[in-house]
Image (cartoon, grey):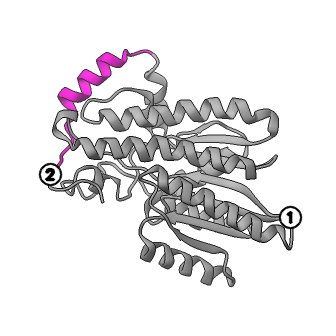
Amino acid sequence: MKNVAIITGASSGMGKEFAVQVAQKYDFDEIWIVARRLENLEEIARSINETKNFSIVRPVQIDLGSTEGVYEIEKLLAQENEKLSKVESGIQIGLLINNAGFGTYGPFEETSVKAEMQMVELNCTSLTGICGIALPYMTKGSVIINTSSLAAFMPLGNFAVYAATKAYVLSFSTALAAELKDKGIKVHALCPGSVSTEFANVASNGARKEVKGGIPPQKVIAQCLARAYKGKTTSLYRFKWKFLSFMSRFVSGKTVARFTYKYNKRPRKPDTKTME
């Protein structure tokens, strides 16, 4: 049986780092890295495959910004499984990492409605669908990692839809972990704060090139993978992130939302186009 890892949102940032570390630390027959930007995926695959001395990373160009992308992955899995079933036992997903997602800075009324709807589609709908279509190919020992956020623990002004989508991811992942525990399938939510990726540039529409106070993703991803395979349900790398998530239990969401709206302004260029 071919043992496969699937990583979405793998063309840059944390997704790219997931691909690098999974290839280094775990033994999969193939690692599928999924995103829209094929050129980036091909470069990442080439770089990793050269160091592994054989082709293990497979770039898969799919746009997960709509449910059509989920159906494309479902079709690809079915095709691969049918092909392999003729010569071996089919395909098994040993690791699924749902990392694709984006956010938008600014008050809800000032941001593109279309972009906000696309955010819900990618961060919530597609993630849910991919978990659903992957489960039939998972067995005892398989792992699901869903990228949530520190923002999941509280409603945030100037970040309203993003925080809400990540709260969904955290809640869904926690419930799914409980449901799949008896089957031996682990489910984990990565809940990072500021990490140095392209996130801020996209969220600010180019107004902020780097996330404020961001840290390199390497240690964040390493801790996430280690905790996920140990059966832990969440990971927050920095003490500050753990402290803020803990304190969110004692402060009302209404208070946090109002405070962040008034005092945590996030720069954003006016929308000239919606997400591609």
Of labels 2 and 1, the one closer to you: 1
Q: Which residues are magenta?
A: 250-271
Residue sitting at 53 percent across and 34 percent down? Answer: 170
**Image position of 22 with respect to 151: above or below:** below
For disc 2, the marked residue is 269
Q: Which label's residue is closer to the chain start, 2 or 1?
A: 1
Horizontally, residue 96 falls left or right of residue 138, namely left
Image location (x, y in percent) of residue 98: 55, 50
Q: Quadrant of residue 209?
A: bottom left
Image location (x, y in percent) of residue 2: 78, 66
Task: Compare residues 93 and 143 and report the one nearer the observer.
Answer: 93
**Image position of 231 with respect to 11: above or below:** above
Can residue 271 be seen here? The reply is: yes
Task: Compare residues 82 and 133 and report the one nearer the observer.
Answer: 82
Image location (x, y in percent) of residue 166: 44, 37
What element does badge 1 sit on?
A: loop
For disc 1, the marked residue is 89
Identified by mark 2, the residue type is Lys
Q: Quadrant of residue 27?
A: bottom right
Task: Compare residues 7 and 244 and report the one nearer the observer.
Answer: 7
